[in-house]
Every structure is written in structure tokens, then in C-alpha cells.
Image: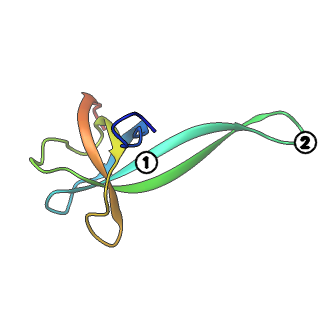
Amino acid sequence: MTEEGSRTQRSVVGRVISDKTDKTRTVLVERRVRHPLYGKFIRRSTKLHVHDEENVSRMGDRVRIRECRPISKQKHHALIEVVGQDAL
């Protein structure tokens, strides 16, 4: 908590896998976790619904997103910026 009382918001980078809905993107966020017994790194992924107010991101783009207040039943992340365009 900062002195203003607001919490710091976590931001992650992911890849847009769906842009079919208006102002909503589905983003796949991948992370690497270490297996508790064998020590090998495993890729784990999470699909998040992200609010994109201006519809600037397209399918295949790498985007930076942050946590925000709940916008709908499934959307609780917002788009910060488009990091790069990837060709699919």
C-alpha cells in the first residue's frame, strides 16, 4: 500500500488469441514454473479477458495488461499498451 491508500497493480505481458468481441480481447499469459520434485521448468498458461476501450489490439499481438476493477462477469484486466505485432 502506498501513502495514498491505493494498491500497486500487477502488469503482465501476453498474446492476444481472440479479438472477435467489441472492446474485449482474450489474452494468453504464459509463465514458467519449476516442478516441485523433478526441478524441470514447465510452461503454464492462463486465459484472461481484457478490456480494450479503443479496439487497438489485433489477434497475435503481444500486449501488456494490468488488473483493474471488475468491468463485467469475466473481465477484470485492462489493456495498457501493445508491445509488438506478431504475424500469425
Q: Which residue is mark 2?
A: 37
Type of amino acid under label 2: Leu
In this view, 85 is above or below 17: above
Residue 28 marker: 1
Q: Position of residue 56 (x, y in %)?
A: 13, 41
In front of the other: 24 or 71: 71
Residue beneath the point at 23% across and 33% down: 81
Residue beneath the point at 28% across and 33% down: 87
In this view, 30 is above or below 74: above
Residue at the right extreme?
Answer: 37
Query: Does residue 2 appear left or right of residue 85 in this picture?
Result: right
Q: Position of residue 74 (x, y in %)?
A: 36, 68
Classify mark 2: helix, strand or loop.
Answer: loop
Q: Residues within 10 Å of mark 2 (few under 14, many from 20)?
A: few
Q: Position of residue 17 (x, y in %)?
A: 34, 50
Of pointers 2 and 1, the one earlier in the residue sequence = 1
Residue at the top extreme?
Answer: 84
